[in-house]
Image (cartoon, helix red, strand yellow):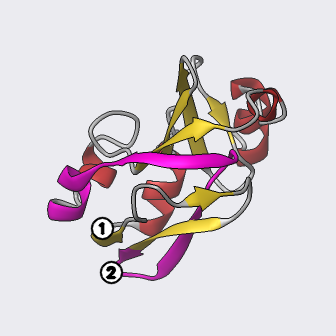
Amino acid sequence: MSSQVPNDLRYAKSHEWVRVNGDVATVGITDHAQHELTDVVFVELPNVGRKVRAGEACAVVESVKTASDIYSPVSGEIVGVNKAVADNPALVNSSPFGEGWFLQVRLANAAEVEGLLTPEAYRAQIGV
């Protein structure tokens, strides 16, 4: 099964995606990542108001196979979390680029987004 890699997002090498709207970046994990994790059974989200740096672990996702840290691809302040995914972790598997998002970060430095992988570079990383 080949993974989806939407063209309107940027990607971290650690398999998070970023969708920017104004000065807020929505963050989730890629289809490839959720496929590797298999069935997600628990998501631990950070507190709103927490400041994060790019590359910092800020959430945890647990599957039937393993637990993995989720890293913020950008620096800033967490301004929103997806309570729906905490209540229904399977959304990460069923809708990784939609309802399965994790958190929203108000960007401290919008230029960081440009440093993330393009869809083409991410496809090359995962071999699709």
Q: Position of residue 90 (x, y in %)?
A: 22, 58
User: Which picture quadrant has residue 127?
Assistant: top right
In this view, which residue lies farthest toward the front? 49
| Count of residue discs | 2
Q: Is residue 25 left or right of residue 87?
A: right
Pick the quarter of the image with the C terminus. top right
Q: Nearer the viewer, residue 18 or 65?
A: 18
Q: Nearer the viewer, residue 79 or 89?
A: 79
User: Which picture quadrant has residue 79?
Assistant: top left
* Sequence-first disc among 2 and 1: 1
| Whether label 2 touches label 1, CB < 8 Å | yes
Residue at image position (30%, 40%) is 95
Q: Secondary structure at mark 2?
A: loop
Q: Badge 2, how many Cα within 10 Å: few under 14, some, many 20+?
A: few
Q: Position of residue 51 (x, y in %)?
A: 60, 58
Residue at image position (15%, 62%) is 87
Height in image: 8 above or below 57? Answer: above
Q: Nearer the viewer, residue 66 or 54?
A: 54
Q: Which residues are magenta?
A: 62-87
User: Which picture quadrant has residue 123?
Assistant: top right
Q: Position of residue 71 (x, y in %)?
A: 62, 61
Residue at image position (50%, 63%) is 36
Q: Using the image, tell me which numbered label, if any, was put on residue 55.
A: none
Distance between the alpha carbons at the discs numbered 2 and 1: 6 Å
Looking at the rendered structure, the kind of residue marked 1 is Asp
Q: Using the image, tell me which numbered label, if any, was put on residue 39.
A: 1
Q: Secondary structure at mark 1?
A: loop
Q: Do we see residue 5 in this rendering?
A: no
Q: Is residue 49 left or right of residue 115?
A: left
Looking at the rendered structure, the kind of residue marked 2 is Val
Q: Is residue 1 magenta?
A: no
Give the residue pinned by disc 2. 64
